[in-house]
Image (cartoon, coloured by chain):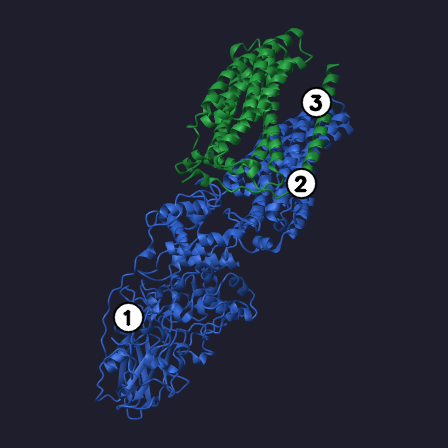
Amino acid sequence: MNYPVWQLTFFGGGLTIALMAVFHVFIAQFAVGGGLFLVLTEMEGYRENSPAIIDYVRKHTKFFLLVTMVLGGITGVGIWFIIALINPSTTSILIHNFVFGWAIEWVFFVGEIVSLLLYYYTFGRMQRRHHLTLGWLYFVFAWLSLFTINGIIDFMLTPGKWLATGSFWDGIFNPTFWPSLWFRTFLALSFAGLYGFLTATAIKEDALRLRMVRFCASWLIFPLLLLMGASWWYHQALPPPIHAMLTDEPPELLPFIDIFLLGAPVLILGGLIMAIKLPQLAKQGLAVLLLLIGLCYFGAFEYIREGSRRPYTIYNYLYSSSVLKKEVPAVAQAGLLKSARWVEYKEITDQNRLAAGRELFYLACASCHSIGGPSRDIVKLTKGYNSIDGLAARLSGLGDLNSPMPPFPGTSAEQTALAAYIFEVLQQREDVAAAAATITPRQHEVPPFDPATAQYVLLGWNDYGMHTISDSDAQFSLRSPGNTIHAMLIKRGQTPQVISDGIDIHYAVEAGSANPSGQVDFWQQAASLTGQKLAPNTGSTGNGVSGLMRLAADGRTYAATDVPLVPYQEDGSYLPYPLVTLTAVDRASSAMLATTTMVAPVSTEWGCRNCHGGPWRKASAGISPETAAAILTVHDRHTKTDLAKQAKAGKPQRCQSCHPDPRQKSGNPALLSLSAAMHGFHANILKGRGADACFFCHQDGAPHGATRFFRGLHNDLGFDCTTCHGVIEDHAASLLLAEQKAGKKAAGKWLAHLQPKGVATLAELKPRQAWINEPDCLGCHTDFQAPTGLTAFNQWTPSEGELYRQRTDNLGIPCAACHNNQHAIYPATNPYDAERDNLQPRQYQGNPYPLGANKNCALCHTTEMKDEMHHPNSLRMMVFTR
Amino acid sequence: MHPAALIPTPDPLQVPWGWFQFLLLFTFFLHMVAMNIMIGSGVITFVKQLSNPMANEALCHDLSNQLTHAIAFTVNFGVAPLLFLQVLYGQFIYTSSIIMGAYWLSVVFLLIAAYGLAYLHKFRFTAWSAGQRRWFLGASLLCMFTVGFFFTNNVTLMQTPAAWLAYFRHPGGLFLNLAEPTLVARYLHFLVAAVATGGLFLAASAHLQQRLPAQERQARIKNGLTWFTYATMVEIGIGIVFLLSLPKPILHRFVGGDWLATSLFIGALIGSFYCIKFGNRERLWPATAALATTILLMVLVRDLARQAYLAPYFHPAELPVAPQYSPMLLFLLILILGLGIVAYMLRLGWQSTKEVQQ
């Protein structure tokens, strides 16, 4: 924010720092251990009075001098150059806080140069004692350099008390100083052996070569054994969040951890092989190979150390985006562009949004992400996002869920501009979410009803406002096909009767939607998903697309559970509102008593692809295999599952088989419920977006989608999801609170970053279980009256019995029988066919209003009624008419 | 956009700025001496290998042996002033470095190449012909010249925030401050000063090399001082051009506008005249003292010029201080101890040379 950003593309993302640093430190460690190697080997030569060994030391010194001074010395300066270019803010803090540390190290550097040059040029020309003194002095200076720099390097990882005191000493002697010092010392000693192989294997005389190679092998092996102990100590000294970063969070570090863990044994084995008699050429090759393995081993360590520090460059103090932790709230409020010095655009307009997005990318992302390069390529990493909004949403969740990433310290307009730059400029893609889905209008036929002669009224309804299924059956199942439809037959008369004796009620899905197994893979995967082998077009309770409804436990209503329905028709079109015809017949005579038609809503329009990538599975809906595979990859990465592998092996899983779902009474009770897990995770990403947040996933509820399931009166009144369910933060938090109350620790992780919106504090949110504690209609409609305020949120139904789909009036008539299901409350407007959801009121009353509305008691009672027997306010005239 | 708005906020100092100013100037002086010897002796060796390689074989061999040491100390003595420069002027030097990022980073690779080639030149000196050698030395020098050019660019860019606006046209680090009026004169001023110093170094090292035949030794001293004298003359000419290319308000400070700046500048000018005088009279040590004084004064003049450039924006005295003295005390203690040990080591080395000679 303070400095300009060197706008690199391919070579960006810290790659240059990493290459320079690993290369330099690999040599610098050698410069320390190698110093001791020189002087001790020289002493060995004197002790054995072996001119050959002394000659070897002299030659090795020349090699040592060239490598450490030309490559080591200059790349050391190079690290300063590159860190100041890529991350000047961090460099400035390190320089200003530790200037005298660096200055002390410089004195040691002078001492190293003078002692090493003298040591080399006076070889054989100086008294042994003096020459050895020079050698020892070199080693002491080199080790003291390590001592000093070690403090500064580890300060970045564990600044410890410095965060509070700002003291030089607290910074240098930080919590990992000592373990790291010994770790690096042993590493340096083992590297001396590793480099020693290069010169030792070049010795011409066989016996001496074997002798010196074995000598080098001991230098490699013994310090490595000590190093393992130091590694453990180092690991123990790390604070818990860094432990978590190493073990829980980023799978990106796992291969490097593996390389590091394997490196030492492999090097020890290599050292042992070097100790046996082998042809010179083989040993020379092996020496080079071991050096390369050493470089990988060491590179992996440095990568892990740097990686575990994320998202900071100075832990808990300065983010990798060069924003101080304490400044984030102020910057987020003012905006990144306004807070940064080196930007051209302080305000985002339609004209400059991509150029401003570019500036935002370089400000906030470029210190870690390259464009098209090998280091955290932003193009590759964001490939899965299908929309600018999806990507912008991901940005808003940074820092909370994905702890290796710092928070994006900008406004939502800046998130969108950055996302647009990445999406439109870097990805060169068009925003799919920008276009509204095309809907082909459908026709309906209103069944006949003659109020003068008809003896029965047959009512039918679906239990949910929308049954959104997943058709990613070969990968996973979030919800399987299976609508539950209900019916009730009422015999008209002054005292109408609910008929459940001697009758049968049949249901039949409309012809175009009657072959669901031809449209989705559920039936092929049913055994793995549900544990049941199901015949095509049959639900788990044995119901097909047509059949007999069963009398429910209440003895009054009929139900057909798990009716296999999908929103795809035989002609390939998407129809989320298939019609079901209900027919009541007299069991004895088979005479038809009544018939009606209802909508059984079913959708596959999950918006997963907005963020997880991939196309729609069918024309305008459905989870494609690409999207599903991407979801499993994320799940596996975050929770160390192997769902993708299982799916590939033909064993896809149902989400509820692990995550409990009160409706299905399944899952592992120790895990978060499916709803809490899904909403808890995604709320952290989608927060601050009102109802739009809901549509990212529940795209079938979006006003621009292919389903648009919110089609009842409440929609016409201008409500949205949040009116009843609350915004996603509150919606998720209420679920998580219940999970937390049940002792599930995982809930705390998702709750930690959620700020409630509808209430002041989390404590004011009422914990709830999904599908049991839902928005209570009577929360707004107190005593069935017109609402005085919109207060459904946080007024949950106390138990399942109070749910809208379960509730009845005073006479036992289910609410939904007269008002239709939750999201299609009469009068509804269906996006495919305006009156499709109102077929029953149209059939029985000729209007779209609730059955019996506008004092149409005669529908069942055949006469006017004066008492509000069903529920208070039931004799009120419709206010919202059309 | 006003350039002042682009200047980053600096971090606080641990001790008052004067300490860092002293350390910066002192260590920069050391760096200048080492750099001058490095480039100067390199140029002289290269010219001698071009003109009469056979006659100059021994001299070139000696100089090539010393070149790598000069590089080592140039780099080492460059680290300290770069450190203190970052402390006092970090917000300027980081910014200008980023604007010319690609060139600035290439300094590292150019230095490795220059150093490596110099070592090759040294270790293969006897194995290669003069024709072969000159390619390696020439390439090494070319790398050094380029490094110097990039340094001159960066140092001029850091003190002219108005030029920073170029970043918005060249955000990829591929900008050089070529429009800077003082650039060429400043660069040549450093290079020619290096040649002069190289000449004096040639003379001085010959003087100290007791093993050399007297005639050869005298010839080298004379030759070195000739290089020194003539290069200093050229240097004065270039210096005048450099002076006149300065922006008028800054030039004014050195010609009467500011007593300190003018005094130091006149002192440096007198120093350079003494360099010519003693060089011409082949008085080695007085010439050396004159050169050291001149370099020191020019380092001070250069610093005052930088302060004058940055005067509209900043002065290091404005930097906030969050006092912590103990780290500095430790540094000074270690510096004294370190220099003592270095002196001890040099004595050991000197004794061994004498032992070998005896």
Residue B91 point in image, percent of width and height: 52, 38
Residue B14 point in image, percent of width and height: 62, 41
Q: CA distance from mark 1 to mark 3?
A: 95 Å
Kind of residue at disc 1? Asn
Of residues A869 and B287, the one drawn nearer to the viewer in this rendering: B287
- Chain for mark 2? B
- Chain for mark 1? A
Residue picked out by circle 2:
B325
Of residues A303 and B5, the one drawn nearer to the viewer in this rendering: B5
Of residues B333 and A859, the one drawn nearer to the viewer in this rendering: B333
Considering the image in quadrants, where does the C terminus of chain A appear? bottom left
Residue A848 point in image, percent of width and height: 26, 77
Kind of residue at disc 2? Tyr
Residue A607 sits above or below residue A31 on the image: below
Residue A237 point in image, percent of width and height: 65, 51
Per the rendering, the mark at residue A122 is: 3
Label 2 neighbour load within 10 Å: few <14, some 14-19, many 20+? few
Chain B hue?
A: green
Residue B319 sits above or below residue A510 on the image: above
| B168 horizontally vs B48: left or right | left
